[in-house]
Image (cartoon, rainbow, N blue to C red):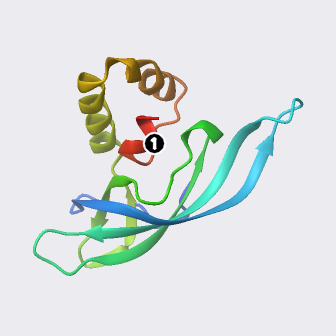
Amino acid sequence: MFGFGRRPGATAITARGEIVHVDLGLQNVDDQGGTRTARYTVLVRVYPDGATPFEVAIKVKLRGTAGPMIGEETWVRYEPARPEKIDFDRDRIRDRAYDRVRTNPGLRVVVDTLYRHGDPPVSVIATAR
């Protein structure tokens, strides 16, 4: 999904991020004209603890219902020595999504549906739509 060598390893750290730009790429459309999957390039501003923020692009393939939006909060994992080895921290995003479900139980259907179909979102707010 992210290309060879992009995933962070065992020494990766987790940091909060914010989506600052989204480019929609190739879309896979079904017979009725609905989007089945879409490829995105997501520019994320990362805010590491005790370090200078930086921006990095992450390529991701998602169902159309889970598209990222500018300004959304997200979480990433990256290698401190090689910040280009970055990926979304989907476990942390899932935990934050379910935190929002606790305050708004109506979101549970959205969150459960995304995870049941193997299409975890890349941001917390995207889950809260």
Which SS class for mark 1? helix
Q: Quadrant of residue 24?
A: bottom right
Q: Residue at x 32, y 58 (%)?
A: 76
Describe residue 114's horizontal placement relative to residue 14 as left or right.
Answer: right
Describe residue 107's horizontal placement relative to residue 62 as left or right.
Answer: left
Name the spot of residue 62 as percent of width and height, x first.
59, 44
Tell which of 78 and 108 is nearer to you: 108
Residue 8 visible in the shown view:
no
Note whether 4 is above or below 36 in the view shown: below
Which residue is disc 1 drawn over?
A: 126
Q: Which amino acid does label 1 sit on?
A: Ala
Q: In which quarter of the image is residue 44?
A: bottom left
Describe residue 74's horizontal placement relative to residue 51 as left or right.
Answer: right
Q: Which residue is drawn at 31% across and 40% down?
A: 91
Note whether 90 is above or below 50 in the view shown: above
Name the spot of residue 126 as percent of width and height, x first.
45, 42
Quadrant that contains the N terminus: bottom right
Note whether 40 is above or below 20 in the view shown: above
Q: Residue at x 43, y 36 (%)?
A: 127
| The furthest residue to the left | 50
